[in-house]
Image (tube, rainbow, N blue to C red):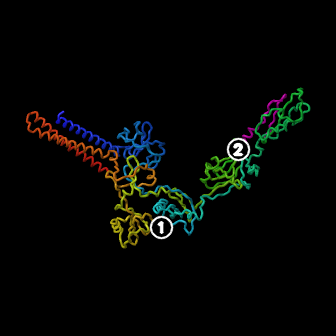
């Protein structure tokens, strides 16, 4: 192959590479913008379920993240959508990052969702501006004129739950309390000292009242409900302390067990004594509901006729509660079975002691639901701490032959009654009355009355990272900006009614807010400024991080500006600490970290275009040199070749123009995306 042919071949190869690279790059960019444009992608920010049952979250940048655990751990939580869109598409590539789900437009497969991971704000910067609602109720505590918490805004009743909590966050207070509720608002107290808050004692949510008691006092006693429904108190060594006659003493006498036995073997034979088998049988049958007696077994009565001349009968009489029973076995009865049976009578005597929501403690026959006894009491208010599910066995009743050990209790289903075997030996039925000094109000929060603080603790997670800024990438991962990439801007966050005591650079009198701001703008060491109602201006240094409530001042703190790549956004969206803490944390941002489309179609692609363009230039120059060498040849073939080469040169210039035009457009799109 001569030099001319080689140059032409190289030229055409490079030109094909440019065209392919252009096409692939443009196609990638086109697909990206279709995927990330809400007008062309209906799945952005939604959950979708594929035809094979796989459920995943589609980020605001068109990345599919499958739920690799129970989807209920994600749906409707931490910014993630609750509803699910059905998609008539199936693929086995749903869990292969970098592949695509064949929807219209196709969705890029990302990493799986982590349990509890936050959703939303993908492709944007976020700033942790708000505390979450992660507060826990500590209790209600008494207050007096020597206040246990520092009341805010001159003790005015102007605070809602949210405003008092937010004030606690802004002033780095761990505890806040609400007292003297007046319909919609209350006084707000702040503190970091829980022991001081609790010094005057806790206010009980409920006051208790005794409705019924056993009036026993043997320590560490137990209680049992017998067959028939009597309440029996036993000492710790098993002796009966007291039997409370609450049962059916007629039909269920002695618990309806086998009793009053009178049995005779061979009464039909000469010399047999009436009742001769009674003692033998009593020594065998003891407190039982039924017994299969073998006649003659363990017999120690008078000797019946055993000569065989008289076939001995067996006759028995016994009672089950108040039911008399008799039986007869004709002779010869020796070795035959006779059944003493009170099981049906006992079964009908089994009782349940029940704590009813109407305030009555009742004993019913379990089988017939017949009322045996009632305390005739009336309950007050339901107490959530006494509901039956929290008591012994999680039920509101005690069945015959069962009971309560020391300090065990059962409650009614609604918690209005509580029956407890107290350690002092007394069995007590309580009701409770809700306290009016500390109650849950219509907004779902608890407020204290006069001289009572309803105290809440703020979670540490709500405060520790306030003010941090991060970037949420297309795959919903959070990248935090280090302090080195943040600088003070010209915009300010205003905190009306706040001060930051100390840390002054200097102060000036008789200034307006705008004049004070200008002074702070011109001072690199100024991070904030305060203006009071007397028009005094105080410039603050970078140590002015704490805030104090003060009706006479307004605090202005410089907002941060971000130093990042031109492909990344500069503004940021405020979010709360729950959302922030539940993003999947990834690597920190750097000044060159790419964002948006640059993170998927990196700049090296454009460098390849430039390199190919340079090669075209080089080959074109070689062709031009070849033309110069052939200028002395004017034969037809030579002229034709030169014309062809000249045409190629013109075409190369044409493609070069197209190349740089497209490249400029692409770079322009990328720049716009980063703005």
Packing grade of label 2 (10 A; few <14, some 14-19, many >=20) is many
Asked whether 344 falls inside the magenta stretch, the response is yes
Q: Quadrant of the N terminus?
A: top left
Mark 2 highlights which residue?
Answer: 365
Labels 2 and 1 touching (C-beta < 8 A): no
Mark 1 highlights which residue?
Answer: 153
Q: How far across and how far down the image is residue 214, in percent?
A: 72, 54
Q: Nearer the viewer, residue 614 or 552?
A: 614
Residue 603 at least partly seen: yes
Residue span colored magenta: 323-350
Q: Nearer the viewer, residue 367 or 444?
A: 444
In the rendered structure, the answer to whether residue 574 lies left or right of residue 19 reads right
Rendered image quadrant of residue 635: top left
SS at circle 2: strand
In the rendered structure, the answer to whether residue 180 lies left or right of residue 421 reads left
Residue at screen point 43% across, 63% down: 545
In the rendered structure, the answer to whether residue 582 lies left or right of residue 635 reads right
Q: How far across and how far down the image is residue 400, in percent?
A: 71, 45
Rendered image quadrant of residue 399: top right
Q: How far across and how far down the image is residue 585, in percent?
A: 43, 50
Rendered image quadrant of residue 206: bottom right
Packing grade of label 1 (10 A; few <14, some 14-19, many >=20) is some
SS at circle 1: helix
In the rendered structure, the answer to whether residue 4 lies left or right of residue 412 reads left
Q: Earlier in the sequence, mark 2 or mark 1?
A: 1
Q: How far across and how far down the image is residue 343, in percent?
A: 74, 38
Residue at screen point 57% across, 68% down: 144
Nearer the observer, disc 2 or disc 1? 1
């Amino acid at each position: 192959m001569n030099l001319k042919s080689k140059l032409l071949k190289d030229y055409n190869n490079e030109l094909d590479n440019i065209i392919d690279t252009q096409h692939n790059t443009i196609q990638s960019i086109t697909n990206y913008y279709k995927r990330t444009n809400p007008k062309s992608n209906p799945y952005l920010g939604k959950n979708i379920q594929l035809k094979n049952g796989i459920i995943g979250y589609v980020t605001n940048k068109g990345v599919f993240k499958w739920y690799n655990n129970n989807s209920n751990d994600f749906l409707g939580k931490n910014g993630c959508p609750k509803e699910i869109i059905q998609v008539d598409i199936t693929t086995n590539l749903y869990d292969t990052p970098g592949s695509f789900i064949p929807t219209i437009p196709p969705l890029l497969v990302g990493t799986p969702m982590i349990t509890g991971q936050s959703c939303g704000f993908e492709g944007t910067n976020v700033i942790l501006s708000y505390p979450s609602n992660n507060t826990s109720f500590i209790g209600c505590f008494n207050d007096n004129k020597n206040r246990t918490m520092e009341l805010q805004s001159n003790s005015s009743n102007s605070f809602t739950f949210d405003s008092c909590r937010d004030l606690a966050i802004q002033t780095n207070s761990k505890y806040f309390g609400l007292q003297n509720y007046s319909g919609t608002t209350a006084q707000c107290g702040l503190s970091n000292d829980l022991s001081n808050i609790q010094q005057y004692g806790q206010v009980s949510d409920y006051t208790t009242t005794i409705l019924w008691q056993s009036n026993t006092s043997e320590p560490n006693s137990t209680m049992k409900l017998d067959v028939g429904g009597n309440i029996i108190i036993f000492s710790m060594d098993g002796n009966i302390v007291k039997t409370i006659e609450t049962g059916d003493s007629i039909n269920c006498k002695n618990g309806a067990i086998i009793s009053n036995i009178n049995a005779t073997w061979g009464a039909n034979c000469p010399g047999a004594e009436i009742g001769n088998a009674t003692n033998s049988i009593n020594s065998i049958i003891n407190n039982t509901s039924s017994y299969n007696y073998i006649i003659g077994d363990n017999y120690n009565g008078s000797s019946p006729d055993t000569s065989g001349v008289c076939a001995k009968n067996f006759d028995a009489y016994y009672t089950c509660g108040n039911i008399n029973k008799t039986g007869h076995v004709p002779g010869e009865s020796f070795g035959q079975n006779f059944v003493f049976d009170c099981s049906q009578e006992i079964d009908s005597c089994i009782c349940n002691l029940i704590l009813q929501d109407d305030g009555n403690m009742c004993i019913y026959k379990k089988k017939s639901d017949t009322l045996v006894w009632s305390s005739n009491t009336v309950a007050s208010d339901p107490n959530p701490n006494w509901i039956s599910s929290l008591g012994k066995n999680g039920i509101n009743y005690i069945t015959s032959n069962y009971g309560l050990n020391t300090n065990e209790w059962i409650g009614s289903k609604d918690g209005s009654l509580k029956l407890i075997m107290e350690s002092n030996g007394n069995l007590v039925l309580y009701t409770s009355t809700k306290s009016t000094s500390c109650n849950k109000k219509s907004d779902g929060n608890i407020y204290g009355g006069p001289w009572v603080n309803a105290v809440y603790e703020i979670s540490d997670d709500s405060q520790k990272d306030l003010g941090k800024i991060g970037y949420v990438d297309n795959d919903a991962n959070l990248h935090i900006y280090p302090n080195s990439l943040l600088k003070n801007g010209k915009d300010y966050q205003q905190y009306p009614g706040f001060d930051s005591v100390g840390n002054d650079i200097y102060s000036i009198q008789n200034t307006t807010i705008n004049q004070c701001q200008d002074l702070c703008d011109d001072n690199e060491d100024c991070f904030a400024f305060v203006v009071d109602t007397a028009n005094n201006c105080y410039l603050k240094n970078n140590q002015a991080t704490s805030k104090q409530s003060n009706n006479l001042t307004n605090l202005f703190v410089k907002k941060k500006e971000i130093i990042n790549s031109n492909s990344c956004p500069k503004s940021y969206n405020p979010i709360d600490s729950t959302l922030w803490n539940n993003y999947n944390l990834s690597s920190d941002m750097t000044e060159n970290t790419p964002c948006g489309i640059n993170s998927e179609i990196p700049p090296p692609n454009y460098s390849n275009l430039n390199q190919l363009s340079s090669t075209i230039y080089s080959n074109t120059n070689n062709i031009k040199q070849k033309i110069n060498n052939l200028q002395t040849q004017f034969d037809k073939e030579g002229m034709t070749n030169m014309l062809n080469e000249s045409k190629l040169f013109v075409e190369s210039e044409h493609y070069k123009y197209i190349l740089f035009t497209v490249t400029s457009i692409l770079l322009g799109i990328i720049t716009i995306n980063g703005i």
